[in-house]
Image: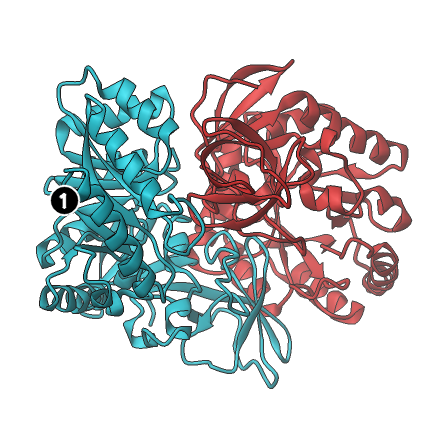
Chain colours: A red, B cyan
Amino acid sequence: MTLPIETPAVLVDLDIARRNVLAFQAYADRHGIRVRPHIKTHKLPQMAELQLDAGAIGITCQKVTEAEAMVDGGARIKDVLITYNLLGEQKLARLARLNERVTVSVVADNATVVDGLAAFFADAGKPLTVLVECNTGADRCGVGIPSEAARLARRIAEAPGLRFGGLMTYPPADGAARVQAFMSDAKRLIEAEGLEVPCITSGGTPGMMQAAEAPIASEHRPGTYIYNDRSLVARGVASWEDCALTVLATVVSVPSENRAIIDAGSKVLTSDLLGLTGYGHVLGRDDIRIDQLSEEHGRLVSDGQIGLQVGELVRIVPNHACVVTNMVDAVHVIEGGAPKGTWPVVARGRVL
Amino acid sequence: MTLPIETPAVLVDLDIARRNVLAFQAYADRHGIRVRPHIKTHKLPQMAELQLDAGAIGITCQKVTEAEAMVDGGARIKDVLITYNLLGEQKLARLARLNERVTVSVVADNATVVDGLAAFFADAGKPLTVLVECNTGADRCGVGIPSEAARLARRIAEAPGLRFGGLMTYPPADGAARVQAFMSDAKRLIEAEGLEVPCITSGGTPGMMQAAEAPIASEHRPGTYIYNDRSLVARGVASWEDCALTVLATVVSVPSENRAIIDAGSKVLTSDLLGLTGYGHVLGRDDIRIDQLSEEHGRLVSDGQIGLQVGELVRIVPNHACVVTNMVDAVHVIEGGAPKGTWPVVARGRVL
């Protein structure tokens, strides 16, 4: 491919992205699962609207500033779940403003966060919906046992400015059984106290095609599925043809027979390994390993002749698509095999 | 420290940065080595001017767009070396415009790059200075043997729009002897053909205090030395007190006795390991390991009680300072222990 763009560049194939979105939506529809995609993968209002058009009921963001960027950029984005413990005056003020504009829900896994939200929203005109985050094996955030979820649910329900919105988890890829067990227990305990559990939301792309094995969950939040990446190909849940995001790079040096240097380093591909060896897959060249990145150089090595020329273009599927979109101000969108335009990644770098 | 800023935030202590800059400048001055700092670490014109004020003779950039941002932002930045093989009409057009504004030099390690530069600059008003990049053991870019350096030097010198500027290398930390040997041979071969070698420039922070062990090099290009980081502390060339850049984060969850989650993940700290285990050092808490990052979460674990509360602030020295400044739009500068201001990282994300 010879596109009239400077390298390194992040390319997104809209046809592949659309196909990926529709494939999971069809699975979810068949199983009565609502889809709430995580926008961290693309960070683009246009892609969120594509997901809504396909049938998603809203979006997921990780940070308040991400949600702000998405709502600012997408007129049809009206329902946002922020799957994060939010603390501090400034973030809660942002959150309250957002809650006036669209339907917003957040999560909490501890009393300090619930009390902070309650204090802030007690006098707000519109109550805030809060779900309890549960740990189903990923050992990141989340209450550890169902009774703790029930305790926190009651605390939320009793706070004047808050509304209990249900249960949320981000399980490991093979976590469906654990989700089913934990959430069933937690739901029973909460309902026994006379509270409703309006939503049970689970997430993750690697296990999304087994989401129906945890029928207690009413909603799923896949992120990477729209683009896919080398980590998902390695897990066997996608093929190279399903990878919508690639990095276009130029060979800038071929210093030895089995080594070439490209103009994409960790400032584009990132150092994320996700358990893999090497930093990406060169399409069409299974023999090449990207064995080393510095910030602006990527090193390609082969056991045999590298067979690349200075000036030649290569396309790379990165290990992890989500982090790559965070490295660039814009992505180059392709549709029908032709350049469609450059889309600014409006939610890039929104860490607050 | 309780600063009125939202977390996660990148803090830069200006006093420490200045002290680090002056320390190496003093060493270089003693040994007659010119200093040309690499701005990839800070990406800030203000810091480049601090380095120039201390005695640096110019700056180093890795990409043309970085150089553009630095020259646009720093009126006193008048001499820029871009240590990269530049290819393609668009980049060369940017380069030519920059070459009209300030003194610019670039490098090349192959004939394709030299010929591309020559074709573009043949009719330019002002010739472009080109150095030959040499591989002294880092096995990234660079010609592999001195005779090849001499061949390329002649090719540059004979090209109408180009001027041969000397030799450049980015050696391994312990590469002084190899730099001395390679560059001495290359210089002799080039001078034997009647060409002058105006500059021999080497680089890197880890080995900078041994730069004088390669007296053939007239210039050194340290980058990380201005901020330092966990990788340099691990190498024994800096202490925690020398680390000017830290990441301020908030504990958002303490889900178990020995685990806490902070609001800084790979989108701030990055996944760069640089051979280390874990993703940063929590100041004042040698017992804590940052054992896992996802994009917006960092996981802190301890063998004993983690002893952190939700809402508490922690300060982290990242593994690699340079990549962290690329993740944020602005850094919070501290001077005399007090907030001085927020500086936009103008050369962030400049990968072209």
Q: Tag 1: Cα neighbours inside 10 Å, few (<14), some, or many (≥20)?
A: few
Q: Quadrant of residue B92?
A: top left
Q: Between residues B58 and A197, which one lies in front from this camera angle? A: B58
Left or right, A201 with reference to B60: right
- Which SS class for mark 1? loop
Relative to B116, does residue A132 appear above or below in the rendering?
Answer: below
Relative to B311, does residue B50 appear above or below in the rendering?
Answer: above
Return the residue at label 1.
Answer: B198
Q: Which residue is drawn at the image coordinates 65% and 53% (left, top)? A: A277
Q: Between residues A71 and B349, which one lies in front from this camera angle? A: B349
Q: Which residue is drawn at the image coordinates 23% and 51% (left, top)? A: B201
**Residue A351 position in % (x across, y down):** 47, 50
Residue B43 seen in the figure = no
Relative to A304, does residue B34 appear above or below in the rendering?
Answer: below
Quadrant position of the N terminus of chain B in the picture: bottom left
Name the chain under label 1.
B
Q: Between residues B203 and A223, which one lies in front from this camera angle? A: B203
**Residue A334 position in % (x across, y down):** 58, 19
Relative to B77, does residue B159 appear above or below in the rendering?
Answer: above
Give, as a three-letter code, the residue at label 1. Answer: Pro
**Residue B127 position in % (x across, y down):** 16, 26
